[in-house]
Image (cartoon, rainbow, N blue to C red):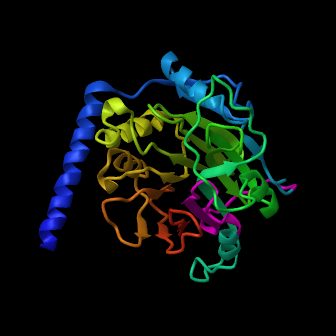
Amino acid sequence: MRCQARSSIRKGAAFLLCAGTFAGCVRWSPPAMAPAASGLCRSASLRWFAPDDQAERRRLDSWCAGVGAPAVHSIAPDSQPFVTDITHLTFVSWNVHVGNGDIRAFVRDLRAGALTDRRTVGDFVLMLQEAVRTDGIPPFGREASGATRIPSKSAGNDIVQISRELGLSLIYVPSMRNGRSDVPAEDRGSAILSTLPLTEPAAVELPGERQRRVAIFARISSLSVGVMHLDALGGPERLWVLWTPWMRGIQERSMRALLPEGPLVLGADLNTWHGIDEPAHRSLEQLAGATPVSLQRHGLGLRVLDYLFFRVGEHHRAHYRQLSNLYGSDHRPLIGWVE
């Protein structure tokens, strides 16, 4: 019975994947991407890219009107230019569930070596999805769009405040307003935090049908790091769920040409409900090229959402593991390193 049940699950997942793929193939292809002008929520401190389609840009502008400007600050580098050895860095990808994840406690344990089998942790990079900000949010006007509010259980969860308390460089780009009111006024999005200076920040607004999603990238010396969070659902005309694997593949394909060249580490919540066989995951895995990767998860079932991708050459080996401790989020952190 157990084998039959597993077989039925796999067949059902395959059907949904095929149905979603078919819907996407028939009705939508990746839009061209082009530079986007700064303004509204698009701070000039980043390079911006967005779909080169006026209807899509109007949709994104509506979501943009509900959020504050990106937050960018970098710790001061030493007087001498720094060159980073990638094997000395620890990489984290984590969906913090709109501030419910206890970032302070996580960083404390990370620095103490409690999450790396006592392996020494010096410099590190956090690539976070669903970070939240509570300061500097504009009033919610008629022209603005916002997401259904996800309540936060953590006090003092503002990502800008946390980064300053921990002495970390920060690039935070809000994707959407957390709620459709001014009480409380919050936005949420992706963030990169690091013990090292972050330079050359760039933001890529992804095509979609429901919410606004923005992938962000930066450089640490010769290494690029990035974070992305793809859509979980499509619009009602796509039956919400059936076409979503193809939709996420479209989002990934639309930004592929904008990925930085050279060594790259990418933290991602791909929302791949149907697991590692979805187009978005397969494509990003191929992008990593010759770098061998080993991973440790708590079960590798159909519903795998979170990943780390490494493109650091065939002479390095990348590792990452999924923690058992949620630290208050609804996603487990991923911790990675390179040898």
| Image-quadrant location for residue 216 | top right
Which residue shows up at 12% across the image and 67% down it? 4
Q: Is residue 296 left or right of residue 192?
A: left
Percent across and percent down for residue 254 are 44, 33
| Image-quadrant location for residue 112 | bottom right
Percent across and percent down for residue 109 are 66, 76
Percent across and percent down for residue 301 are 31, 65
Q: Is residue 246 left or right of residue 271?
A: left
Which residue shows up at 54% across the image and 74% down it? 325
Quarter in which the N terminus is drawn:
bottom left
87 inside magenta stretch: yes
Pick whichever, 107 or 219, lies toward us.
107
Can I make out residue 65 in this image? yes
Q: Which residues are magenta?
A: 79-104
Which residue shows up at 37% across the image and 37% down it? 247
Name the residue furthest bottom. Answer: 118
Name the residue furthest top. Answer: 54
Pick whichever, 146 or 250, lies toward us.
146
Query: Please, is residue 165 above or below residue 110 in the view?
Result: above
Query: Please, is residue 68 above or below residue 132 in the view?
Result: above
Q: What is the tally of numbered marks visible in this picture?
A: 0
Which residue shows up at 68% across the image and 62% down it? 154
Q: Is residue 290 left or right of residue 312?
A: left
Can I make out residue 122 in this image? no
Q: Is residue 14 left or right of residue 195?
A: left
Name the residue furthest right. Answer: 79
Pick whichever, 151 or 100, lies toward us.
151
Percent across and percent down for residue 208 are 45, 32
